[in-house]
Image: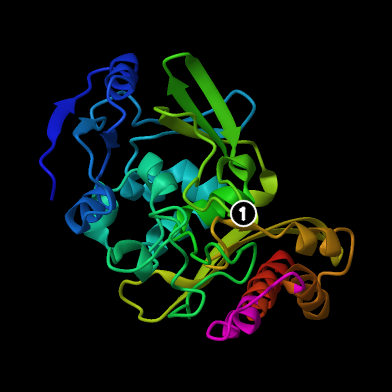
Amino acid sequence: MRDFGYQRAHDVPGAVALLGADPDARYLGGGTNLVDLMKTGVERPALLVDVRELPLDGIESTDDGGLRIGATVTNSDLAAHPEVRCRYPALAEAVLAGASGQLRNMATVGGNLLQRTRCGYFTDLSKPCNKRTPGSGCSAVRGEHHNHAILGATAHCVAIHPSDMGVALAAFDAVVTYETVDGPGQLPLAEFYLPVGDTPHLETALPPGALITGITLPPAPVAAHSRYRKVRERASYAFAIGSIAGALDVRDGVVHEVRVALGAVASRPWRARAAERALAGGPATAEAFAAAADAELAAAEPLSGNAYKVTLTRNLVVALLTELAEEATR
């Protein structure tokens, strides 16, 4: 590991100024991903700016009925918050599905948004990886890729985003707020993550040196009727090979509103817009849910080792929406 400096920030402007003064500096929240990457040599910061003591650890209702979540709120506190559990249950379930209890106690909301892919070639410095070293190639396309992307990938990168939390945030149209030396800004989550294209090393639209200060969830009554489901290769602790956050409002057997976001299928949490459009105003039946999943997955381009994800994802969509539809009739 490269030698590095450490400095604790005491306010947001100070943190932004520290990072702006050193292009090799990184913000340190929980450090559950960054420190691992420093150990492998993928990340080599000259300075860590500790932001854990900044006053960004609150969760509060907004005037319009939404929820504002501070960037340094831990995953454990987020999942346990009564307003999150009541108004956005899929978000609480997604957080609890990720990592171990010890890691959730350390990991922060802001850090979760910025966690890097778990593609083995990304952390293996002996192998080419366009995300780590632009222009070097993608080892996964012809190598080990059983848990890689089936949607939105290119020949330059087929890695997936590992976040569970991000999938639920995508379903609920979360907005990321941040601070820079030029002032505050915000990005809808749909614009926060950049498409892979031919620049997979550019992962977010955050301005250089920006500090994530929080997330705002708009009011969404349908979110109260939501669930998160995750498929993984071991029950205790593993990243998803498929996941879904879904919310459904059914009235007289007809879909009044639906939200669907998918995880472990793309380089970013994948909002299933085609599926939502297919379901809007139609019957809330398993057949309709299957047709909606097919509409979304028509764009899938699986590789030789991950074609199973198409069927897995289709089954997740049908199972979760059927469960929500049955709950609506009780």
Q: Relative to residue 269, is residue 300 depicted above or below?
A: below
**Could you say where residue 326 lies in the image, as x and y percent from the top left?**
70, 72
Q: Relative to residue 19, is residue 80 depicted above or below?
A: below
Q: Main secondary structure of the magenta part?
A: loop
**Could you say where residue 117 lies in the image, as x and y percent from the top left?**
41, 59
**Residues packed near mark 1 inside 10 Å, few (<14), some (14 to 19) or many (20 plus):** some
In magenta segment, residue 215:
no
* Amino acid marked by disc 1: Gly
User: Which residue is found at the position 57% from the left and 86% from the top?
Assistant: 304
Please name whichever residue, 59 or 317, is drawn nearer the observer in this view of the structure. 317
Residue carrying label 1:
197
Please name whichever residue, 84 or 95, is drawn nearer the observer in this view of the structure. 95
**Could you say where residue 145 lies in the image, as x and y percent from the top left?**
47, 77
What segment is highlighted magenta in the picture?
298-313
Q: Is residue 307 visible?
A: yes
Please name whichever residue, 239 or 218, is drawn nearer the observer in this view of the structure. 239
